[in-house]
Every structure is written in C-alpha cells, then in structure tokens.
Amino acid sequence: MIKKLGNMEYNQKRERCGQYLEALEEERRKIHVFQRELPLCLDLVTQAIEACKREIPETTTENVYGQPECSEQTTGECGPVLEQFLTIKDSSTSNEEEDEEFEDEHGNHDPDKDPEDDNMKSDWLKSVQLWNQPEALLPKEERSPQEMMETVKRDESMRKDPMMNGGEGRKREAEKDERRKQRRCWSSQLHRRFLNALQHLGGPHVATPKQIRELMKVDGLTNDEVKSHLQKYRLHTRRPSQTVPSNGNSQTQHFVVVGGLWVPQSEYSTGKITGGATTSGTTTTTTTTGIYGAMAAPPPPQWPSHSNFRSSVIVEEGSGSHSEEGMVRCSSPAMSSSTRNRYVKKS
DNA sequence: TCTTCAATAT
DNA sequence: CATATTGAAG
C-alpha cells in the first residue's frame, strides 16, 4: 500500500516538474526577445531549466505550489532560482505574442481556504483589466476631462470591496469638483500588459506611448496615462544609483543594459494577507512592501528608498544575516537617450 | 513631514 | 513625444 502511495506521489511530482519545465521554457522564449537587455535573465532561466531537468528523477519537495506568486524571490545565480519564474500558469503554451490574461491559478483544493484569502484574491482579480472606472467607458468615448467623476459607483462585482472603512462618517469623497482626473491605478495586470507591449516594441527606450497603448489594447486607456506611466518606468529603470562602492573594476563584459523590467507579482493586497501562513521558515515578510516584484536584468539597483518595486535580484538571504548589499551591478551607461530611433516599424 | 505616483503643463 | 511641474495619497 505504501508503496503504491509513494508511487502516485512520485508520479505527481514528476508531472509537476514537467509542467514546471515547460513553463520555464516558455519563459525563456519570452525573455529571448530581450536577450540583449537581459542576458543574465536568460542565462538564469537556462540554468534553471537545466537544473530542473536534472532534478526530474528526484522528488524534491521544494515548492509548495500553494502560494501563487508572492513572497520570496530567492535568486541565486545558480540553483534555486526557480520559483521566481513560476508565476506562470500552467496554461503556458500560449503564444508569446498575445499573452492573454492571466490564469486563474486557483488550484485551491485547499480544504481550509480562508474567506479572507478569497477576498484578497478576488480583490485583485477584480481590479483587473480595468481600474475602478466608474463605468463610463464607452469604447468610442475618448477622453473628456470632465465627466466620469460621479460617484464611485462600483460594479456589482466590486461591491464586496472591503476597503473604505465604515468608520466615522468621514470618508473621502472624491466627489469634489476636482478638475483632476480620477487617479488610475495600474494594477498588476495592467502593468503586465504594459510590459508586454514594451517588449514587443523593443524596450522602454524605443517604445512610444502611443504604440504601447495600442498594443495593450485596454480600452479606456489614454495616451497620457501610458505616457505618464512610461515616464515613471523609465525613471525607475535607469540606474538610480551608480554608487557602486567597490570595484570600478572591469565591468562584466558585454552587457549593456539598462532595461529592467518590473513585473508585477502581487497586487496591492488589502493590506494584510492571509494572516501569517508560516509555511516555512521562509517568511521574510518584507513588511508590506511587496507590491510589485521586479524583474530586472542587470541588476538594476534597488529603487530609491522603499519603493514598491523590488528588484528581484535580491541578494539571497544568507540564512540569518541579511547583508545590505552584496551585489554589484554593472552600471551601464544608460543606454543613452541618443538614438532613440523610433523609426522602427519598417514593415 | 516626506515620498511616490499619476495628471497635467510646457 | 519628452520632460517638468503639480497635487493627491500614503
């Protein structure tokens, strides 16, 4: 009996491993486009793939797939990089170009699934695609900087929204006559699309807001919004620091890079995530900061202070001691704005 | 108060 | 289209 059980388990694991492998390969294809900018990334994934292949026969219980994205990104150069790339759904096989929305990865068979968890998840799932647009979106409607204020009438689907404390009567009504447009929030899906578009256009420095918007195909999205976002993206992206302490040493060979990519991993959660799950000791729990995970190629240094974007290239935690720095990043000479040739598009 | 982020202004 | 400035939110 036991044997049988073990066998099953084994098979299962093997299968999972296979899926994982596929996912990795897919990821690699995607990054390939960026190989110039993300050489390390590519390399990393490649290594991961190899490692994985090697591991297949073995049953490693390393990751519990319970948690979707979230948490830790352990990035080493070589080993256990894996999970980070795991955000993929198993629906992989999607074409690389039109990566249509996310998966639903609720593989929740979990008996004890919290309502809260559900809430959280649905929270971001809902905000997906569209921000909280009141509803005023007509396809044809193009920007009109006035109306659309209204009350924050949420969709039916949204009414669950736990935010907004029902505290005292003081809630922030945005109802003021503000002339300013309602602030859009770039959900992770949105940002994802943004990144995707960026990729196809060849990187943040050559992509143009309009093109990006078109590629994103999100209705209601305006050029200005994209522009603004792009601006921010570029700002964060271009090496924030060059204060590389040590070594002015020969920088690591050829990579010229500059583009980092932030890739959203977890959305803003309502604030608290499922209690402390204490899955393992691994809770690094960067208190409330983990908003977007970042994926970067060269080591794009950490963004200024505590920003929401974390570079994925975190120094791996050395069990117990977290050294502040530890990574050297090659600062590329900012891919110079020069030649921002955007004359692409040659058929 | 200082920072971040998106909207607007140039 | 790129940047700079503004103003809200945290």
Image (cartoon, coloured by chain):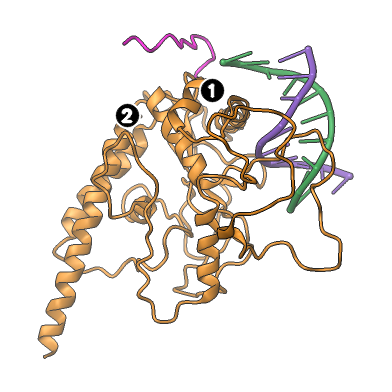
Chain colours: A orange, B purple, C green
Q: Secondary structure at mark 2?
A: loop
Upstream in the sequence, badge 2 or badge 1?
Answer: 2
Closer to viewer: mark 2 or mark 1: 1
Task: Tell me if A258 is positioned left or right of A41 in this view.
Answer: right
Q: Is residue A298 visible?
A: no
Q: Residue at x 65, y 46 (%)?
A: A134
Q: Which residue is mark 2?
A: A33
Q: Nearer the viewer, residue A82 or A114?
A: A114
Main SS class of the magenta portion in the image: loop
User: Which image quarter holds the C terminus of chain A?
Assistant: top left
A26 magenta-colored: no
Q: Residue at x 63, y 59 (%)?
A: A288
Q: What chain letter is assigned to the residue under label 1? A: A
Q: Which residue is mark 1?
A: A209
Task: Tell me if A293 is positioned left or right of A44 in this view.
Answer: right
Q: Is residue A3 above or below residue A131?
A: below
Q: Quadrant of residue A64?
A: bottom left
Q: Is residue A289 above or below residue A145?
A: below
User: For the residue marked with disc 2, what is the amino acid?
Assistant: Val
Q: Residue at x 53, y 33 (%)?
A: A139
Q: Residues within 10 Å of mark 1 (few under 14, many from 20)?
A: many
Q: Residue at x 14, y 89 (%)?
A: A2
Q: Is residue A271 visible?
A: yes
Mark 2 → mark 1, Cα distance in angstroms = 20 Å
Q: What chain letter is assigned to the residue under label 2? A: A
User: For the residue marked with disc 1, what is the amino acid?
Assistant: Pro
A340 magenta-colored: yes
Q: Which residues are magenta?
A: A335-347
